[in-house]
Amino acid sequence: MKKYFKWLISLIIAFTAILAFSIVFISFLPLPQLESVEAAEVSKFKTLDNFPTPKIENPELILGPAGEIFEFSTCNRGDLGFTIANAQIPAGAGPLPHIHHYTNEWFWTPEGNLELFQSASEYPDLNKPATNDQAGRTTLYTVDTSPNQVVYSPKYHVHGFVNTSNKTRPLTFVWIKDQTSPTYPLNDGGIREYFQEVGIPIKNIEKLPPITDESKKKFVTLAPKYGINQSNYFLKYASAVSGQPPVALANLTNDQDLTRIIDAINAYNQGDQSVKCF
Ligand code: ZN
């Protein structure tokens, strides 16, 4: 009995020692999941206090199919080509789910109040959009934006947004030409050319032109010419909506290209001749 008791004490001591060692060892192990989330939270483009606009005379004004007022400018610097639109989005308005093939896009939301949505799935074939009879519909993950937030949405993802507030809100769009884009006249991946063809030119901001059915139709039918798949009703591309994006999707950024864009605009505004904006 005494021998058995001694043996039991030894076993308890040994077990305690192993447990203590394991706790110390585990505490020194890296935590990759937690670290990557932390890295995303300190991403420097999570918010931007101000997004520069190229100082050009008479920027082009175009009315979108949902009543959006777009003010366009496009810049080229060497191989870099991008288009910016400072837009006013009416309450409840926004584009239906769509996919870009030749551009990568950022949204900057000065006042927030816009609910962006994006797919985790990618649709790289322009001839196979996210419909049931083609590449299959997708889940859209929503981001309820806060003021000055920057959200990156690269090519091939289905995306869009809606103004969830009861008043008109500003939104700045930035589209950078993707390396795979064919050549378009403005060297911007075709996005401004698309709006020029399908949108309605605004001559007088005080007197907006009516949005025609023809314009709404062209917005969808002519989209592939500019490397875009545009749905004409919400559930054409979407099978579900979720407020919990996968970590990889929530952490998407492209700070390198965004920095090149901001540098080019600032250089143009300071008179640098290597940048052309129009
Ligand atoms: Zn888009």
Image (cartoon, rainbow, N blue to C red):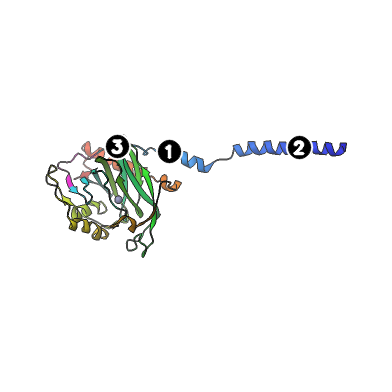
N-terminal of the pair, mark 2 or mark 3, is 2
Q: Position of residue 264 (x, y in %)?
A: 27, 41
* Residue denoted by label 3: 111
Q: Position of residue 42 (x, y in %)?
A: 42, 37
Above or below residue 230? Residue 63 is: above
Q: Position of residue 198 (x, y in %)?
A: 20, 55
Using the numbered discs, state the Cα–Cα distance from disc 2 to disc 3 in whole angstroms: 62 Å
125 or 200: nearer the eye? 200
* Residue denoted by label 2: 12
Using the numbered discs, state the Cα–Cα distance from disc 2 to disc 1 in whole angstroms: 44 Å
N-terminal of the pair, mark 2 or mark 1, is 2
Q: Amino acid at mark 2?
A: Ile
Above or below residue 168? Residue 98 is: below
182 or 223: nearer the eye? 223
Q: Crowding near pointer 2: few (<14 within 10 Å), some, many (20+)?
A: few
- The region drawn magenta spans 53-61
76 or 254: nearer the eye? 254
Using the numbered discs, state the Cα–Cα distance from disc 3 to disc 1 in whole angstroms: 20 Å
N-terminal of the pair, mark 3 or mark 1, is 1
